[in-house]
Image: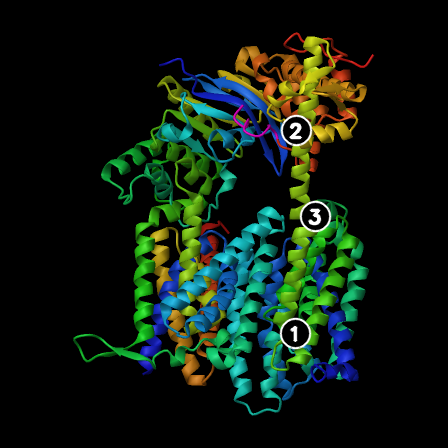
C-alpha cells in the first residue's frame, strides 16, 4: 500500500520538476505559484457539474481556469497597465478565493476541503484501484494517470527540446529566425498547468510549486549544459521526494509539507557545497 | 549582385506606449556594404532594427528586405541581438549557442547533423573562439561573448546580417577581430547593418551611414553624411515640434494614420 | 432575515468590524510602496513563508496566545526575507525563483508543524486553521488589541521614513546619491511588510494576504497620479473590503473571511478597470470614438474648404457632398450645430466660422507637409499620409511653433498656397 503512495509521489515529482525547469529557466518561477492557486475553482466546478472525480473532467475544468488566469494576467498588464507581478497577484488570489468559497459552500458535495487543498491527499491516492486487463494486477488509478502524465511531459520536452531551449535562452533571436516565442511560451505554461492540475489532488497547491521550482533550481547550480541539467533535475526531484516522504512517515507529519521542506533543505545544501568548492578552487588558483 | 536595396524602409513610424520614438523613417541600405545606424542615446537605433526584424509592429509604413517581405526571405537574414538581452547563466556552452544558428524552425525534428557541427566549428574558427567551444558561456569575457553571438550568426549562412551594438563592452582585441571579420564578410558580398553609438569610430568602420535622432537626419555614403552640419543636427537635440506632438498623440490616444492607411 | 442580521446588535461585531478594517487599511499602505517598487509578489512569498512562525508560536505557547504567535510570525517573516536575499545574492537565480523556493519549502515546514499541532491535543488546536484563510468572527477584543499595537507601530514607522522612502520608490539612484542608506531603508520596508502581513493573519489569513498588499494599491494607482492620493484610496478600499468580508464571516460562521475580502477587492478592480479616468476602458473607448468623430468632422469641413479653393464658391450641392467618403446626415447636422454650415434648399452654405475652420485645417496639413519635407527631409510624395492625421492634432501653440520654425512660409512642398487669416 505505502509503496504505491511512494511510487505515485515519485512519478508526480518527475513530471512537475521537468515541466517546471523551463519556467525556472525563463525566470517565471512565480507563475507556478499563480497557476497552482488559480486552477482550484476549475477543479471544484468540474466536480460539481459532472458529479464525478474522474481525471478528464477535472482536467477540462482546470484548463479553463488556467486560461482564465493567464488571460486576466495579460489583460491587467497590457490593457490596464498594472505591473507584471501585481497582475499575477490579483488574478491568482481572486481565482483561489473563489475556489475556497466554492469548496466551503459545497463541502458536503465536493468531498474536498480547505485542508486537502493545501496538503493534497496522497495517502489516499492508492485506495481506488483498477485491474489491468488480461492480468490480475490491481493498480491504483492515480498511478496510471501519473504515469501517463510523465510520458506526455517527457514526449513534449523531447519533441520541442530545441524550440524550448531557444525561446528560453534568447527569445528575440528565436523570433528573428521564425520560431514563435508566444506559442512556445504558452506551451511551456500549458505544460506546467497540466502537471499542476493532475498533481493538485495528490499533493496540494503548495507542494506543486516546490516540485516545479526547487529541483530545477538545484540542478542549475551544478550544470553547465541543458541536457545534463534536466537529468539532474529529475534526480534531485526523486531524492528530495524520497527523503521527504520517508521523514514524513517516520514523524507522522504532512507528507506534502515534508517533501516541500526537504526539497528546500537539499537546495540549501547543494548551494553551500558549490560555494565551498568554488572558494577552495579560488584559493588554490590565487597566488597567496 | 542586383541593384535591389538590401533593406528598403518606407515611411516607418514606431512607438512605445503610444508615444512615437521613430518618425516617418524612409531610406534604403544598399547590398554588399557595411552600413552603420548611428545616433545619440535614445535616438531609436535599436527600435529601427527591431522593426526591420519584425520584432515590433510599426504604426505606419513597412520594410522590404531584398525587395520582399521578411517572412519570405527570413533564411537570408541573421540577427545579432544586444548582448545584455540574454541570461548568460543559462546552462549552455559555446558550442550549444553556435549550433542554435543551425536550427530550422520549419523542420519538426531538428537533429544536429555532422554538417551542422562542421559549419559551427568553421564559424568558431572565423571568430577565433574554437578553443573555447566547450566553455560555459558565463565564463567568457564580454568581447568573447559577442564573438560567440557573431559565430552563431555566421552559422546561419545568411546574406544580410543585422547587429545591435556589437562593439559595446568589448576589449580591443575582440574589436579588431570583429572588425576584420566584418570586412571579410563584406568582401564576400554580404551586407552587414550595425547599430553603433560611437561617432569617433563610425567614420572609419562604415561605407554607408544612416544618421538617426528619432527622425532620419541623413542616409547615404559615409563621406556625404559625415558633414559637420548634419552631425550637429543629429546630436544637437530633438525637434521640439516632434516631441510635443508625440506627447499629444500619447495623451489623446490618437492614431498615427487614418483608418486603413497604416501601410503608407 | 432578522436572525441573520442579529449580530449587528453584538458589541463584539462592531469592534471586529472596525478592527479588521483598520488592520487591512494599514497593510494596504505598506503594499502601496511594494507595488510601486514592483515587489508585489514579495508579499505573497512572505505571507506563505511565515507559517512555521505561527505554528511554532502556537507550540511554544501551548495555546492560542496572539502575542507569541505574532512575534513568531514576524521573526520567521524576517528569516523568510533574509533567505530570499541570501539565495539571490549567493546564486545566479533571479528573485522570482528564490521567492518560489523559500515560499514553498517554508510553507512545507509550516504544514509539518501544523500536523504536529493538530495531533498535540493542545486547546484550540483546530483554531490554527483560522490563520490560513482568516476567520474574522473568531477575533476577540484582546487579539484586536495586540494586532492594533503592531499596526500603530507600522503607521508610525511609515510616517517616520515617509520622505526617504518616497524618494527611494521613485528614484533609487538619486536617493543613493543624496546619501540615504538605501539598503537600510529596504530592510525597514521588508520588516514593515512582514509586520503588515502578520497583523492580517486572523482576518484575511496568510494564504490570501498577498491580495491585501497588492490589489488595493493597483486599484488606487488607476485613480491617482500622486502618492498621497494613492495611499488614501488604497486604505479606504482595503477597509471597505475587510468590512465586507467580516460581515459575511459573521453571517455564515463556517465561511472563511479572506476569500470574501478578496472577492470584494476584485469587484473594486473590475469597476476601476471600467471607469477610472485615463486608464479606464470606457474612458479610453470614448476617447477613441471622439477622436474618430473629430477626424470625420474636420475632414468634411476641409473638403468644403478645398471646394471653395477651386471654385471660389461657398455653396455646395448636397449631391456633390454625398460622394465624399465621410458623408453622413448626422455629421452634417453636427457641423451645422458648430455654426460651420447652413442648409438652404438642396445646397449647403459654408459659413464664415466654417471657412475659418477649413482654412485652419488646410493650413495645418500643408505646414506639416512642409515640415516633414524640410526638417525630416522626406520626399515630397511621402509627406501626405502623415499630414492627413496630424492636421487634426496640431494645436494652436504647435502651429505657432511650426510657423516660427518654417519662417511663415507661403507654399507647401506641392506648391499649394498656405492660407492665413487675413
Q: Can you say whether B184 is above or below B150 in the image?
A: above
The magenta stretch is B256-264
Please state, as top left, top right, bottom left or bottom right, where the N terminus of chain C lies in the image.
Answer: bottom right
Q: Name the front one of labels 1 and 2.
A: 2
| Closest to the observer, C14 or A151 | C14
SS type, badge 3:
helix
- Kindly tell me whether residue C226 is visible in this rendering: yes
Residue B6 x, y percent position in the rendering: 43, 20
| Residues beneath discs 1 and 2 located on the same chain | yes
Q: Can you say whether A257 is above or below B215 in the image?
A: below
| Closest to the observer, C281 or C148 | C281
Residue wearing tag 3: C172
Q: Please check the rendered image and state whether residue A204 is part of the magenta-colored stretch, yes or no.
A: no
Subunit bearing disc 3: C
Residue wearing tag 1: C201
> Distance of mark 1 from mark 3, alpha carbons?
31 Å
Residue at 53% x, 14% y: name it: B220
> Distance of mark 2 from mark 3, alpha carbons?
46 Å
**Is residue B12 left or right of A177 when viewed as pictured?**
right
Q: Earlier in the sequence, mark 1 or mark 3?
A: 3
Residue at 54% x, 86% y: name it: C118
Q: Name the front one of labels 1 and 3.
A: 1
SS type, badge 2:
helix
Residue wearing tag 2: C296
Amino acid at each position: 500500500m505505502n509503496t504505491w503512495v511512494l511510487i505515485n509521489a515519485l512519478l508526480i515529482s518527475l513530471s512537475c520538476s521537468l515541466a517546471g525547469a523551463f519556467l525556472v529557466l525563463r525566470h517565471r518561477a512565480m507563475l507556478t505559484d499563480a497557476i497552482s492557486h488559480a486552477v482550484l475553482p476549475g477543479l471544484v466546478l468540474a466536480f460539481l457539474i459532472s458529479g464525478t472525480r474522474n481525471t478528464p473532467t477535472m482536467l477540462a475544468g482546470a484548463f479553463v481556469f488556467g486560461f482564465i488566469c493567464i488571460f486576466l494576467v495579460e489583460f491587467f498588464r497590457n490593457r490596464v497597465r498594472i505591473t507584471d507581478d501585481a497582475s499575477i497577484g490579483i488574478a491568482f488570489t481572486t481565482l483561489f478565493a473563489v475556489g475556497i468559497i466554492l469548496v466551503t459552500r459545497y463541502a458536503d458535495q465536493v468531498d474536498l476541503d480547505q485542508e486537502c487543498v493545501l496538503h493534497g491527499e496522497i495517502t489516499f491516492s492508492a485506495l481506488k484501484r483498477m485491474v489491468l486487463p488480461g492480468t490480475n494486477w490491481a493498480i491504483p488509478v492515480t498511478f496510471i494517470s501519473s504515469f501517463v502524465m510523465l510520458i506526455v511531459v517527457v514526449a513534449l520536452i523531447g519533441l520541442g527540446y530545441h524550440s524550448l531551449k531557444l525561446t528560453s535562452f534568447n527569445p528575440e533571436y528565436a523570433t528573428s529566425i521564425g520560431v514563435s516565442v508566444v506559442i512556445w511560451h504558452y506551451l511551456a505554461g500549458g505544460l506546467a498547468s497540466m502537471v499542476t492540475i493532475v498533481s493538485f489532488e495528490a499533493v496540494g497547491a503548495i507542494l506543486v510549486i516546490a516540485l516545479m521550482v526547487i529541483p530545477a533550481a538545484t540542478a542549475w547550480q551544478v550544470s553547465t549544459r541543458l541536457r545534463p541539467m534536466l537529468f539532474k533535475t529529475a534526480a534531485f526531484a526523486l531524492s528530495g521526494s524520497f527523503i521527504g516522504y520517508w521523514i514524513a512517515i517516520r514523524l507522522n507529519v504532512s507528507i506534502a509539507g515534508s517533501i516541500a521542506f526537504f526539497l528546500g533543505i537539499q537546495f540549501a545544501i547543494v548551494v553551500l557545497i558549490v560555494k565551498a568548492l568554488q572558494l577552495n578552487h579560488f584559493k588554490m588558483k590565487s597566488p597567496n | 549582385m542586383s541593384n535591389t536595396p538590401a533593406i528598403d524602409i518606407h515611411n516607418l513610424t514606431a512607438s512605445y506606449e503610444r508615444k512615437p520614438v521613430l518618425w516617418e523613417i524612409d531610406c534604403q541600405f544598399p547590398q554588399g556594404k557595411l552600413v552603420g545606424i548611428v545616433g545619440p542615446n535614445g535616438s531609436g537605433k535599436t527600435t529601427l532594427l527591431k522593426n526591420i526584424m519584425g520584432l515590433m509592429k510599426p504604426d505606419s509604413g513597412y520594410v522590404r528586405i531584398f525587395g520582399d517581405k521578411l517572412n519570405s526571405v527570413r533564411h537570408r537574414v541573421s540577427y545579432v541581438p544586444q548582448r545584455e538581452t540574454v541570461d548568460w547563466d543559462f546552462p549552455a556552452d559555446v558550442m550549444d549557442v553556435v549550433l542554435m544558428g543551425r536550427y530550422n524552425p520549419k523542420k519538426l525534428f531538428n537533429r544536429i547533423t555532422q554538417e551542422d557541427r562542421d559549419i559551427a566549428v568553421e564559424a568558431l574558427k572565423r571568430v577565433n573562439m574554437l578553443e573555447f567551444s566547450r566553455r560555459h558561456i558565463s565564463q567568457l569575457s564580454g568581447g568573447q561573448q559577442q564573438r560567440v553571438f557573431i559565430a552563431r550568426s555566421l552559422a546561419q549562412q545568411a546574406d544580410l546580417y543585422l547587429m545591435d551594438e556589437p562593439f559595446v563592452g568589448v576589449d580591443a582585441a575582440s574589436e579588431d577581430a570583429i572588425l576584420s571579420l566584418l570586412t571579410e564578410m563584406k568582401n564576400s558580398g554580404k551586407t552587414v547593418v550595425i547599430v553603433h553609438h560611437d561617432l569617433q569610430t563610425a567614420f572609419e568602420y562604415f561605407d554607408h551611414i544612416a544618421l538617426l535622432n528619432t527622425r532620419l537626419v541623413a542616409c547615404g555614403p559615409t563621406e556625404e553624411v559625415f558633414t559637420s552640419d548634419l552631425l550637429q543636427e543629429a546630436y544637437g537635440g530633438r525637434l521640439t515640434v516632434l516631441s510635443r506632438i508625440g506627447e499629444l498623440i500619447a495623451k489623446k490616444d490618437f492614431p498615427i494614420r487614418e483608418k486603413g492607411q497604416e501601410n503608407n | 432575515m432578522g436572525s441573520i442580521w442579529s449580530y449587528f446588535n453584538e458589541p463584539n461585531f462592531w469592534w471586529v468590524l472596525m478592527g479588521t478594517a483598520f488592520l487591512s487599511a494599514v497593510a494596504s499602505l505598506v503594499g502601496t510602496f511594494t507595488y510601486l517598487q514592483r515587489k508585489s509578489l514579495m508579499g505573497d512569498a512572505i505571507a506563505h513563508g511565515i507559517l512555521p512562525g505561527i505554528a511554532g508560536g502556537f507550540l511554544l505557547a501551548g495555546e492560542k496566545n496572539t502575542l507569541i504567535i505574532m512575534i513568531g510570525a514576524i521573526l520567521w517573516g524576517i528569516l523568510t526575507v533574509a533567505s530570499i536575499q541570501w539565495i539571490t545574492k549567493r546564486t545566479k537565480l533571479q528573485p522570482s525563483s528564490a521567492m518560489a523556493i523559500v515560499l514553498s519549502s517554508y510553507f512545507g515546514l509550516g504544514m509539518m508543524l501544523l500536523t504536529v499541532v493538530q495531533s498535540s491535543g493542545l486547546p484550540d488546536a483546530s483554531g490554527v486553521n483560522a490563520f490560513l484563510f482568516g476567520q474574522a468572527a473568531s477575533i476577540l477584543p484582546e487579539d484586536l488589541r495586540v494586532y492594533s499595537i503592531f499596526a500603530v507601530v507600522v503607521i508610525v514607522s511609515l510616517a517616520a521614513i515617509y520622505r526617504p522612502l518616497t524618494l527611494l520608490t521613485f528614484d533609487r539612484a538619486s536617493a543613493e546619491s543624496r546619501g540615504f542608506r538605501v539598503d537600510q531603508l529596504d530592510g525597514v520596508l521588508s520588516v514593515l511588510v512582514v509586520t503588515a502581513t502578520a497583523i492580517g493573519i486572523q482576518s484575511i489569513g496568510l494564504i490570501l494576504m498577498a491580495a491585501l498588499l497588492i490589489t488595493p494599491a493597483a486599484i488606487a494607482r488607476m485613480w491617482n497620479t500622486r502618492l498621497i492620493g494613492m495611499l488614501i484610496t488604497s486604505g479606504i478600499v482595503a477597509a471597505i473590503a475587510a468590512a465586507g468580508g467580516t460581515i459575511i464571516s459573521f453571517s455564515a460562521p463556517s465561511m472563511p473571511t479572506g476569500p470574501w475580502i478578496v472577492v470584494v477587492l476584485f469587484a473594486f478592480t473590475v469597476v476601476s478597470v471600467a471607469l477610472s479616468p485615463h486608464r479606464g476602458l470606457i474612458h479610453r473607448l470614448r476617447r477613441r470614438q471622439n477622436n474618430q468623430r473629430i477626424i470625420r468632422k474636420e475632414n468634411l469641413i476641409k473638403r468644403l474648404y478645398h471646394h471653395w479653393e477651386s471654385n471660389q464658391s461657398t455653396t455646395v450641392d448636397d449631391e456633390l457632398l454625398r460622394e465624399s467618403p465621410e458623408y453622413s446626415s448626422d455629421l452634417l447636422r453636427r457641423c451645422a450645430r458648430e455654426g460651420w454650415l447652413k442648409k438652404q434648399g438642396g445646397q449647403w452654405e459654408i459659413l464664415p466660422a466654417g471657412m475659418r475652420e477649413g482654412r485652419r485645417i488646410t493650413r495645418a496639413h500643408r505646414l506639416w507637409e512642409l515640415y516633414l519635407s524640410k526638417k525630416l527631409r522626406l520626399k515630397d510624395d511621402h509627406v501626405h499620409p502623415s499630414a492627413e492625421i496630424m492636421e487634426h492634432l496640431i494645436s494652436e501653440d504647435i502651429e505657432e511653433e511650426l510657423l516660427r520654425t518654417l519662417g511663415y512660409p507661403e507654399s507647401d512642398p506641392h506648391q499649394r498656397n498656405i492660407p492665413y487669416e487675413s
